[in-house]
Image: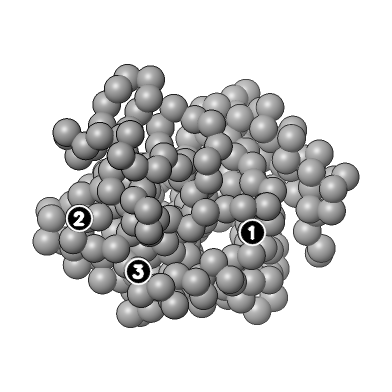
Amino acid sequence: MKAMIFAAGLGTRLRPLTDRVPKALAPVAGRPLLEHVIRRLARAGFNDLVVNIHHRGEQIIDYLAGHDFPGTTIRISDERDMLLDTGGALLKARPLLDDGEPFLIHNVDILSDIDLADFYRRHRASGADASLLVSPRQTSRYLLFDDSLRLRGWTNRTTGEVLPPGIRPADYRPLAFGGIHVFSPALFRRMEAGGWQGRFSIIPFYLSACGETTIRGVEANGIHWYDVGKIDTLRQAEAWLTHEGGADAP
């Protein structure tokens, strides 16, 4: 099975740590974030991986060249010339990903103990075009879902902004995106038809497509989940990995 790891971010929230290394190589419990994610994907059966790079990307290339992940093929999608954001990154990596089968996408700064293989199987069984890991955690920005957990919109509770314009957030269930999703290649054709190109985020694309395609939420219940994009949450994830059984085996 194929998966893409978004590892090209600037890691500004992790400064000064990322002044010297890319976010993907920030150490957590003695290992880089990227290694934790690769090992979890590989254990779940994702053995064909694509990693995108930008900030200090040569360090990621050197790291992967110097480390062996048996049974796993890892290829690079190089964005060192231009950071493309999540949607643009997918489009650039399409030749490495699009074999007609759905593939999983995993942010490098997300650590969790979700059953990734089951998450993927549930997507395949659902017939959805994309499945997004979501939860009711506190944040300012929420995706809006109907009673069947089909994506219908988005809101920023701080600014009052909503998408699509005119949608009533009170009519829907607000859930926060968890940085893990499964993407079916048919959505690439919708990207092309909609003129999506260059640098763009995947969430606005999902919102543009959700009226005519099935973008569904999969709620995360009873799992550990950490956004390790900030120093304080990095330390929380480190404590979990070290002391609560989350550490990866070699």
User: How far from the left and from the top, in percent, is residue 19?
Assistant: 58, 28
**Disc on the earlier residue, 1 or 2:** 1
Residue displayed at 13% across by 55% down: 194
Report how far apart the C-alphas of labels 1 and 3 lie in the structure: 20 Å
Task: Specify the amino acid type for callout 1.
Answer: Ile
Count of numbered circles in the view: 3
Residue 220 in picture, x, y percent from top left = 57, 53
The residue lying toward the viewer, choosing from 162 and 93, is: 162
Give the labeled residue for mark 2.
211
Marks 3 and 2, the one that precedes in the sequence: 3
Secondary element type, mark 2:
loop
Disc number placed over residue 68 in the picture, else none: none
**1 or 3: tag closer to the N-terminus:** 1
> Is mark 1 in CB contact (under 8 Å) with mark 2?
no
Residue 186, picture quadrant: bottom left
Using the image as rendered, state which of residue 249 and residue 221 is in the foreground. Answer: 221
Q: Quadrant of residue 237?
A: top right
Residue sitting nearer the eye, 209 or 98? 209
- Say few, some or many: other residues with alpha carbon within 10 Å of mark 3 (under 14 / 14 to 19 / 20 or more): some
Q: Indicate left or right for 111 with 168 as reference.
A: right
Q: Taking 130 as reference, is 244 above or below it?
A: above
User: Residue 30 at what x, y percent from top left?
Assistant: 80, 46
Q: Amino acid at mark 2?
A: Gly
Q: Estimate how packed mark 2 is, as few (under 14), some (14 to 19) or many (20 or more) residues with alpha carbons within 10 Å.
A: few
State the CA–CA distance, disc 3 to disc 2.
13 Å
Q: Which residue is mark 3?
A: 128
